[in-house]
Image (cartoon, coloured by chain):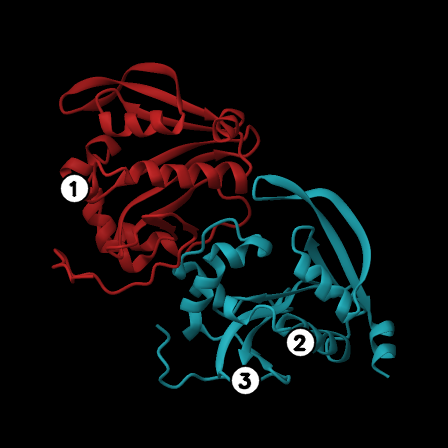
Amino acid sequence: MEKKEKSNEIEEVEAFPFINGENIDLCPRNSKLAKVYVCWKNHPRVRKYARNVVPRTIEDQSKRFERRTEGLVDHISLDVWHKKDNKPIGQIGLSRIDWINSWANTFLQIGEPDYWNKDIGTEATELLVEYAFNELNLNKLHGGVAVDNIGSWSVAGKIGFKLEGVKKHEMYVDGKYVDTKIFQLLKEDWVKGKQD
Amino acid sequence: MNDKKKDFATPFLEGILINLCPLNIEHANLYTKWSNDPDIRRYSRNIIPWSIDEVKKWSEPKEERVKKEIIFEIWHRKDNKPIGRAGFSDINWFNRNANLFAEIGESDYWGQDIGPEASRLLIDYGFEELNFYKIYSRIFSPNKQSLRAAEKIGFKHEGTLKEHIYIDGEFVDESRFAIFKKNWLNSKK
């Protein structure tokens, strides 16, 4: 594997894979990567649809990883780790987990634009969906994407997420209100889809 | 990957293949690897990822006066390195019982009877030093290896909780195995 020039000096960190995929692993987050996370959060193209509209500092990021929630968590986030290039390239996870009604929102952000349009988002989402249904035993997953965010939209469709509805003028992006599509995936449909 | 500089292990309980040593925060990397590894965590039911920052925090001394759990590092004597963790969780000092667990984090050491050896050391310790009355273990039905090990050690099956645990997309049974001080001490005579 040839050594690539790294744009920002990152300490060598271990991945500690939590879920194994083919091209990527999903790994716990790590305060040593705070610098990397900050680059993603603040990157103009990356943050566009993630709606990070306020700047994030390294301190914001590095404080977040030592608190382990007591009892039930309502948020799980993982690093998307590129196996061949041996580096984290984005994050994925579940937010607002509702244990009673058994659903969660999914989120995904490939923070390194070089890795866009390479089906990495699809693979990461597949791994997350399997984890959410088969390990966490959730019943339903939501995903929301802005209407013109073609990238996320196609990921959702490939995995079997179905359009649940459109929220009019839900987001303010680049000077105008845009619609948001709400996708949902039911566990029973996912299980059926895997059998076919 | 493991820097071999001067790894430090101070045995607390001595066995034949292994010793049980106190946890060592210098090994937070290993603990994090084991806690997250899909094959290791399957039957430990670590279903939420652990960041290394959380593991370090977890390894720090706790405020509690009376320990609710006592956890050791399993140290391989010949290879001179930590290969897993074992101990008591959910210690109940009134009823004098506790849940025993052993997790071999390095899969190269699976199938070498290290789990049973760690368990025996812990059982001796639990009954003869901590004055437990009963030690139990929770085993999930797909985990055949632990079921066999528990029986070999002398644990008796107490009951089965039907479809109690969700593993790999299905509900499976949880069996409770237990051993009492009186039986253990008798069997050693």
At 56% from the left and 37% from the top, the residue drawn is: A137
Determine whether the residue tagged by mark 1 lies in a helix, strand or loop: loop
Residue B128 higher or lower than A15, as above or below: below
Residue A188 higher or lower than A92, as above or below: above
At 37% from the left and 54% from the top, the residue drawn is: A65
Q: Which amino acid does label 1 sit on?
A: His
Q: Decide which of A108, A97 is in the foreground and name it.
A: A108
Mark 3 highlights which residue? B77
C-alpha separation, residue under disc 2 versus residue under disc 1: 53 Å
Q: Colour of chain A?
A: red
Q: Decide which of B183, B145 is in the foreground and name it.
A: B145
Q: Colour of chain B?
A: cyan
Mark 2 vs 1: CB contact within 8 A? no
Residue A119 in picture, x, y percent from top left: 27, 37
Q: Which amino acid does label 2 sit on?
A: Glu
Determine whether the residue tagged by mark 3 lies in a helix, strand or loop: loop
C-alpha separation, residue under disc 3 versus residue under disc 2: 13 Å
From the image, state whether disc 1 or disc 3 is nearer to you.
3
Residue B96 in picture, x, y percent from top left: 77, 66
Residue B77 in picture, x, y percent from top left: 54, 84
Mark 2 highlights which residue? B117
Determine whether the residue tagged by mark 2 lies in a helix, strand or loop: helix
Q: Decide which of A87, A1 is in the foreground and name it.
A: A1
The total number of labels drawn is 3
Q: What residue type is labelled 3?
A: Arg
Q: Are marks 3 and 2 on the same chain?
A: yes
Mark 1 highlights which residue? A43
